Image (tube, rainbow, N blue to C red):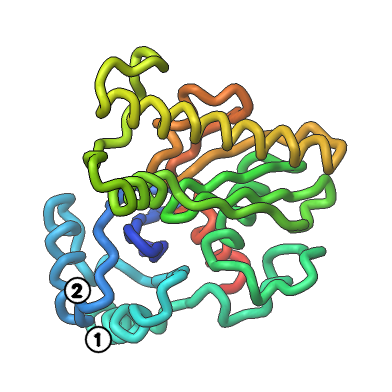
Amino acid sequence: MLLVLDVGNTNTVLGLFEDDQLIHKWRIQTDREKTEDEYAMLIRSLFKYQGVKLNDVNDIIISSVVPPIMYALENMARRYFHVEPIIVGQYPIEKYLKMTYPNPKELGADRIVNAVGAIKEYGTPLIIIDFGTATTFCYIDETASYVGGAIVPGIKISVDALYDRAAKLPRVEIEQTEKVIGTSTIEAIQSGVYYGYVGQVDSVIRKIKAECKQNPKVIATGGLAELIGQQSNEIDVIDMSLTLKGLAEIYKIVK
């Protein structure tokens, strides 16, 4: 089995592949303070619930946008799984993704992995949106080359900033409201944040389409993709496992 890990600023998503099929998936909080032993015990408990053992894993591939966590994860792979993990970024990007982006080293591992997975799954051209701590938009042209994109603050960052900067406004859960016109402060914040963010996402997509003069398929992934995608007029596909599938594809390319 292949264990894939996508380490984000807020959450880490793990997937277990057997014969190219994603058979299990977990989401845990990213904790920069955890040791390799703590991560190993946490993963072992997740495995145990599904009847999987640590020694069922033959290989590990990791993508991360949190460099401080890598020491613990790499040591965990060696000590508990007895494998040398593949790290996205240890090979030249062009080995698995064509690039017209001027400085590929600027790109986060998650954006690269999403691009590889989406090209394999959906063809080209593409716009890929990842709703993480930040929301990223990536454009892949008809030649399957990574061109560039846009980055905006994630919706949770926006809500936290509103709470921190406006003394009388409460912190609210991010959810879709039935009406845009809220009849309480909480409803008004929820409505404004939700529909405002959906409008922002659709506007950025339309501008990318106009600029590239193409009609790319729009793929959404990440923690809030389903919530935002259900009201978006521009998102075509919601794929909550896109990053994991991209990691599995990179593994096949580099192994």
Q: Give the number of the mark in front: 2 or 1.
A: 2
Give yes or no for contact between labels 2 and 1 (Cβ–Cβ under 8 Å): yes
Q: Answer with left or right where residue 49 lies relative to residue 188.
A: left
Q: Residue at x 53, y 39 (%)?
A: 220
Tell me which amino acid carries mark 1.
Answer: Arg
Residue, disc 2? 40
Asked whether the viewer can see residue 74, the reply is yes
Q: Residue at x 62, y 66 (%)?
A: 253
Label 2, label 1: how far apart the Cα atoms are: 9 Å
Element type at mark 1: helix
Q: Is residue 176 above or below residue 95?
A: above
Across and down, in percent, residue 111 comes to 58, 59
Q: Residues within 10 Å of mark 2 (few under 14, many from 20)?
A: many
Q: Answer with left or right where residue 195 lies relative to residue 139.
A: left
Q: Is residue 146 above or below residue 55?
A: above
Across and down, in percent, residue 53 comes to 19, 64
Q: Nearer the viewer, residue 16 or 184?
A: 184
Name the image quarter holding the C terminus: bottom right
Name the image quarter holding the N terminus: bottom left
Q: Residue at x 79, y 32 (%)?
A: 215
Q: Quadrant of residue 112?
A: bottom right
Q: Residue at x 87, y 37 (%)?
A: 213
Q: Is residue 250 above or below residue 21?
A: below
Across and down, in percent, residue 21 comes to 43, 47
**Mark linked to residue 79:** 1
In this figure, what is the number of numbered marks?
Answer: 2
Q: Residues within 10 Å of mark 1 (few under 14, many from 20)?
A: some
Tell me which amino acid carries mark 2.
Answer: Ala
Asked whether the viewer can see residue 120, the reply is no
